[in-house]
Image (tube, rainbow, N blue to C red):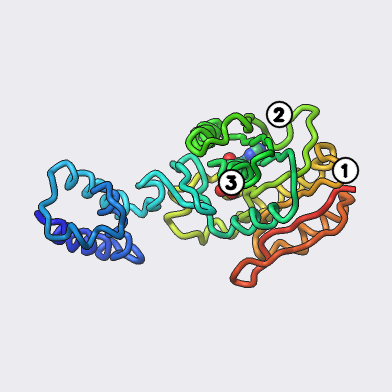
Amino acid sequence: MTVALALVRGVRALKTAQVPDAANDARILLAFALSIDRARLALVLPDEMPFAVQQRYDQAIGKRVQLQPISQIVGKRAFYGRDFRVSRDVLDPRPDTELLIETALTQDFNTVLDLGTGSGCILITLLAENLHATGVGADISEAALEIAQANADLLSTNPRIGFVLSDWFSGIADQTFDLIVSNPPYISADEMQNLDPDVQNWEPEIALTSGGDGLESYRTLIRNAPKFMNSGGRLIVEIGYKQGQSVRNMFEQSGFAKIEIFKDINGKNRVISGIWR
Ligand SMILES: C[S@@+](CC[C@H](N)C(=O)[O-])C[C@H]1O[C@@H](n2cnc3c(N)ncnc32)[C@H](O)[C@@H]1O
């Protein structure tokens, strides 16, 4: 079978399964199976597909038919210009979270703590962008920490980074930081019912929700953060777009100053920061 015919069949299979953006996904998966850049696909369309490539492609299409996210199938996801390894054990890094990175990088820092590090995308990016900083990534999921460690190795931030299995601050001991960041699980129990199936069925529930109103993680993080912050340090968290006022109130109650809410490219509240006195 030629590459072109395989592409047509892949698109058809995805369309039949009502996968949104079937043509685009089939191209990504075909390039993945062929181990080539997507931009080169047009050049090889007339070629015969080797059997092993055909099998790899069929498997990938089969997974997408089940609505497994593309990033999990190809095993990586781009975030802030770098490729991160991902699996079913971690949240797929989202473009929205790049706003947290941009906010954090507006000021210098030497030490950073990332709570709920998942794939490590936030912490590793911050250390890759700020070469004199060191950081700790905490997560309650051992499997996520293995992925984060692999990403730290791949992206050469390893000597400046440490990971700890921790229920929020429980494993952090006596350290204090210039910067604490977090993208905690913030989807409410009600919103969980309406998530797209590729998120609901394939991403770890513990990465998506802490149940109830979706604010429980913030209550713990914002109440306890001051004990782990250097004077003048910043706490920066990603929020759901309806959570700005509730989370701002928590920052105020904990005694943070200069509280600011930042909007994403869709004009929605997405990140909130405050300075510890
Ligand atoms: C929304 S994901 C964010 C992952 C990554 N930081 C990112 O932005 O892509 C939330 C992360 O918090 C972790 N988490 C959930 N509950 C936790 C807890 N009690 N203590 C520490 N981490 C927790 C999850 O395992 C998950 O990796």
What amino acid type is highlighted by mark number 3?
A: Thr
Left or right: 142 with respect to 19? Answer: right
Q: Ligand 1 falls in which quarter? A: top right
Instruction: Name which of mark 3 and mark 1 comes first in the sequence.
Output: 3
Residue visible at 52% across and 47% down?
91
Q: Which residue is mark 3?
A: 125
Q: Which mark is residue 50?
A: none
Residue visible at 53% across and 45% down?
205
The image shows residue 194, relative to residue 36, as above or below, that is below
- Measure how far apart labels 3 and 1 are at the Cα level: 24 Å
Q: Which residue is mark 2?
A: 171
Residue placed most toward the observer, 247 or 126: 126
As helix, strand or loop, the secondary structure at mark 1 comes to strand
What amino acid type is highlighted by mark number 1?
A: Ser
Residue 43 image point, x, y percent = 20, 60
- Measure how far apart labels 1 and 2 are at the Cα level: 21 Å
Disc nearest the viewer among 2 and 3: 3
